[in-house]
Image (cartoon, rainbow, N blue to C red):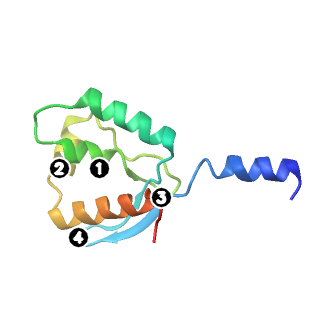
Amino acid sequence: MNRDQLIASILKASSPKPIRLEVDGIGPVFVRVMTAYDADVTRKSLDATKKDDGCDIGRLLASMLCDEKGDLLFTATEADTVLKLSKLPPKAQTAILNAANQANSADPK
C-alpha cells in the first residue's frame, strides 16, 4: 500500500458504516457508529437539550437512528419526535440501545 492509498484508507475509516438490525414491531433500522467527534457533538447536544420531560431516551435514540448512509433520521430538539421515540416499546428501545452500545464499543462482537 502506497502513502496515498494509506491516507485514503484512513480517511475512509472516519465515516464508519451504520449497523443494520431488525427490531420487532418496526423492521429494519440503522444505528450510527459514532466516532469520537460524533460522540462529543452528541453529548454536547444532549446536554444542551436536557429537560425534565421524560424524553431523555427519545433524544438519545434520535442521536443514533440513521439511514443506511449514516445520516440521522431525527433531531433531538424536535419535541414531538423525541416524545414518540420515548414511547417506543421497551423491547424496541433496548434492541436499538444494545446495538448502539455494541457498535460503539472498543470490542464489538
Callout in the foreground (3, 2):
3
* Label located before the other in sequence (1 or 3): 1
Residue at image x 28%, y 45%? 60
Label 4 Cα neighbours within 10 Å, binned few <14 / some 14-19 / many ≥20: few
* Label located before the other in sequence (4 or 1): 4
Q: Are marks 1 and 2 in contact (CB under 8 Å)?
A: yes
Circle 4 residue: 25
Q: Are marks 4 and 3 in contact (CB under 8 Å)?
A: no
Secondary element at image label 1: helix
Q: Amino acid at mark 4?
A: Gly
Q: Amino acid at mark 1?
A: Leu
43 relative to 49 in the view: left or right: right
Q: Can you tell which quarter of the image residue 78 is in?
A: top left
Residue at image x 16%, y 63%? 90
Q: CA distance from mark 1 to mark 3?
A: 20 Å
Secondary element at image label 3: loop
Circle 3 residue: 106
Secondary element at image label 4: loop
108 relative to 79 in the view: left or right: right
Label 2 Cα neighbours within 10 Å, binned few <14 / some 14-19 / many ≥20: many
Residue 69, x across and y down, in percent = 53, 54
Callout in the foreground (1, 3):
3
* Label located before the other in sequence (4 or 3): 4
